[in-house]
């Protein structure tokens, strides 16, 4: 079993998620993993077809800018 990657967890927690030390150390590894996973929902960026579908689902309201 690999040791928990604390260095990488702290780098993402403090540097990317901008957590305070108190918030970081209060999290469980599972909570931290969920927060990190939220940075890239679905595991891949939105492609052109996905963006077009999103635009059809949520069109801009031209009457209320």
Image (spheres, rainbow, N blue to C red):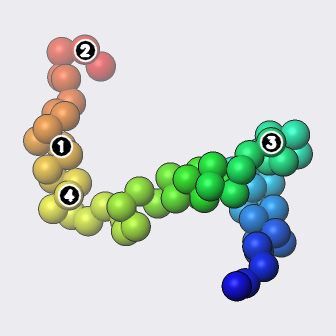
- Of all residues shown, which one is farthest toward the bottom? 1
Cα–Cα gap, marks 3 and 2? 42 Å
On residue 64, the disc is 2
Q: Residues within 10 Å of mark 3 (few under 14, many from 20)?
A: few
Q: Which type of secondary structure does the marked residue at label 4 adopt?
A: helix
Q: Measured from the top left, where is residue 65 in percent x and y?
A: 30, 19
Image point (80%, 42%), residue name: 26
Tell me if residue 38 comes above or below residue 65 in the rendering: below
Furthest-right residue in view?
A: 21
Instruction: Give x and y (percent) for residue 4.
Output: 76, 73
> Can you identify the residue that label 1 sits on?
55
Residue, disc 4: 50
| The quarter of the displayed image where residue 29 is located | bottom right
Residue linked to disc 3: 26
Residue at (26% x, 65% y) in the render: 47
- First-in-chain label (3 vs 4): 3
Residue 48 drawn above or below residue 61: below
Q: Residue furthest front?
A: 1
Discs 3/2, front: 3
Which is in the foreground here, disc 1 or disc 4?
Answer: 4
> How far apart are labels 1 and 4 at the CA level?
9 Å
């Amino acid at each position: 079993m690999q040791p928990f990657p604390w260095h990488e967890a702290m780098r993402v927690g403090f540097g990317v998620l901008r957590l305070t030390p108190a918030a970081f150390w209060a999290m469980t590894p599972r909570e931290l993993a969920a927060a990190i996973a939220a940075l890239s929902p679905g595991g891949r960026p939105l492609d052109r077809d996905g963006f077009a579908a999103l635009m059809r689902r949520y069109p801009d309201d031209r009457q209320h800018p």
